[in-house]
Amino acid sequence: MILDATAGNRTMWQHKNSANIIYIDLERKLTVKPTIFTDNSSTPFLDLTFDAIFYDPPHGWGKGHPFYKYPDAKSFKEKWKGYGDIPRYYGWDKNKNRTQLIGSIFRAQREFYRILKDDGLLWLKWNEVMIPINNILAIFKDWHILIELVTDDPTHTAGYQKTYWVCMQKKTGNEKQPTLLQFQLSNNNTHVSL
């Protein structure tokens, strides 16, 4: 099972109604309603429920969005209004300042640690519109970074900042280190044991 922990209007998904994804959000005025209205820092889910969690938190705070302050703001407003009749929702209004945003990300990652399976994956999306990625990754102390993908494609960043997708796995304390890898060949079959 997959959790979209900041569903917004599901604009990041090409298929918006997967039976394998639970969509959660706090915002009640969304065009595309989540599966459950809940805070991602205090969910109703049991421990170790999800195989993967996608987390695209607000990348800033306050009521404004900096994409609109640039000289060509009119074209950005058109480009970023969403897909068809579905507007994008960024959640910037949920935090009044940097301290509140950092606190909400901290609390959310702590909840994700609880509800993600030990071998599950957390995908964090971050845009450096106001805070550098390294400052955000410092919050994720109980996680191993497996992959960090970066894009400066203007369709994902409005042409001004980099967007990162970071894949993480929980640090569990009981991770097994690989032992001697042994290969045994018999009858053209390969047997691998650890």
Image (cartoon, rainbow, N blue to C red):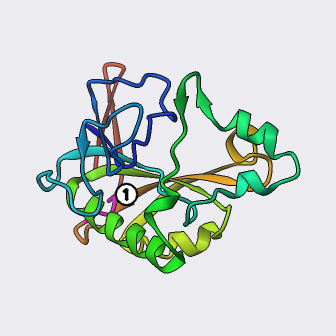
Q: Amino acid at mark 1?
A: Gln
Q: Which is nearer the eye, 165 or 25?
A: 25
| Vertical comparison of 10 with 145: above or below | above
In screen coordinates, is 139 left or right of 19? Answer: right
Predominant SS along the magenta part: loop
List x then y, in percent, for residue 141: 41, 75
Which residue is rendered at x = 21% and y = 62% of the image? 42
Mark 1 falls on what kind of element? strand
List x then y, in percent, for residue 51: 27, 43
Q: Residues within 10 Å of mark 1 (few under 14, many from 20)?
A: many
List x then y, in percent, for residue 144: 42, 64
Residue hosting label 1: 169
Q: Residue furthest bottom?
A: 99
Which residue is rendered at x = 47% and y = 71% of the image? 101
The quarter holding residue 177 reads bottom left
| Vertical comparison of 190 with 62: above or below | above
The magenta stretch spans residue 103: no
Which residue is rendered at x = 63% and y = 35% of the image? 81
* Residues drawn in magenta: 175-180
Q: Residue furthest right?
A: 71
The magenta stretch spans residue 178: yes
